[in-house]
Amino acid sequence: MNAAQAKQLSLPDLLARLGYQPVKSQKEGNELWYTSPFRAEVEASFHTSFLGGKWIWKDFGDIGGTVVDFAMRYHNATSVKEALAWLDTLIQQPPSAARIPIPQNQPSLFSFQQQRGAAAPVAEDSRQLEFMAAQPISHPVILEYLVEERRIPQDLALRFLKQVSYRNTTNGKEYFGFGMENMSGGYEVRVASSKYDFKSALKARDITLIQGSFPERGAVNVFEGMLDFLSLLALLGTKSLAGDAIIMHSLSSFQRTTDFIRGKGYERVNTFLDNDRAGQECTQRFISELGVAVTPQSEYFANYNDLNDALRANTPAL
C-alpha cells in the first residue's frame, strides 16, 4: 500500500477496527463525531468528514489531516513507511461487532482490499505542520507560562526544553511553542497557553530518553508527558533522577516504550502516569506486559490528577 492508496481508506472503518464508534452522525453519515482516540474525554472532540472522495479528520485538542496523518499520530509512527505498514496490518483485522454503516459512494476497507493490486498514482505525504527551528527558550510568553502557571523552575525548563518554531503549511502562518527532542531527532511540541491544549510532533514521533545519574541505570522511570517529568524533578528539588527517564509524550506510545524497556533490560520500572482512567489503564497494561518489574508511583500524588497538579498545589504562587 502506498500513501495515495492509504488516503482512500475509510477512516470510520479503521476506527471501528480499533474499537471506536461514533457518538454523533450528520449529513447521512458523511460527518461523524467520536470521543478522541488520543486521550480520555467525555465530550467528543474528534471529527471526521468525507470530502473530495476521501476521509479527513480534525481533533480539536490535537491536530488533523488525512488517513495517513491519523496512522502517524495514533500509532506514533516515526515514518510514513511505518504508518503504512501498520495500516496494512490493521485492515487484515476484523472490525468490532458494532460496525457503523458506510455512506454510499465511499470506498470501504473490503473494497480496497479487493483492489490492492490496482495501479495508483504515487503521492508524497503532506504534513500540516513543518518544523522550522529549535533554540534555547527566550520568549517571555513561554517562560511565564512554564514558571508562573506550571511552576516549573526556570533552570529546569531551560535545561530540558527548547523553543520550537513551526509553520502551518495549509495557511502559511508561523507559530512557536516549547518542546522536547525525542529519540528520532523530532520534537514533541506544546503551545504555551492554558486556553489551548495543543500538542503535536514535528519531524518525527518517538519517545524521549533522559539518562539517569547512575551509570548502571538499573531502573527506568516512565512519564506520559514532559511536564510530568519536570514536575517530579521540581518536587524532589533535584536536576536529575538516579535512574533513566522515558517520556512517552502520548499513551499511544505504549508499545514503543515497552519494546525499548525490554531491549535495555531494565530491572525496575517506575510508572508515574496520571490518576485518571486512561493513565491507570495504561499502568495496568505495563504491569500485564512487564510483570513484577513494574512499580506504580501514582499513589504518591493520589490526591491529584498528575504530577504537575501536585506541583502547582504545593508550590506558592510567584
Image (cartoon, grey):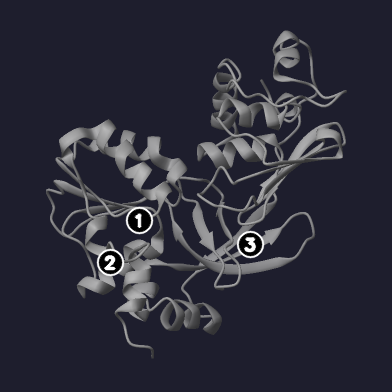
Of labels 3 and 2, the one closer to you = 2
216 relative to 41 in the view: left or right? left
Residue type at mark 2? Leu
Q: Which mark is residue 166?
A: 3
Q: Earlier in the sequence, mark 3 or mark 1?
A: 3
Q: Nearer the viewer, mark 3 or mark 1?
A: 1
Q: Secondary structure at mark 2?
A: helix
The mark that comes first in sequence, 3 or 2, is 3
Residue at x 68% of width, y 24% of height: 2
> In the rendering, at what x and y percent does residue 17 appear?
58, 25
Q: Residue at x 87, y 36 (%)?
A: 52
Q: Three-letter amino acid code at disc 3?
A: Tyr
Q: Which residue is mark 1?
A: 275
Numbered circle sitting on residue 175: none
Q: Secondary structure at mark 1?
A: loop
Q: Position of residue 53 (x, y in %)?
A: 86, 31
Q: Amino acid at mark 1?
A: Asn
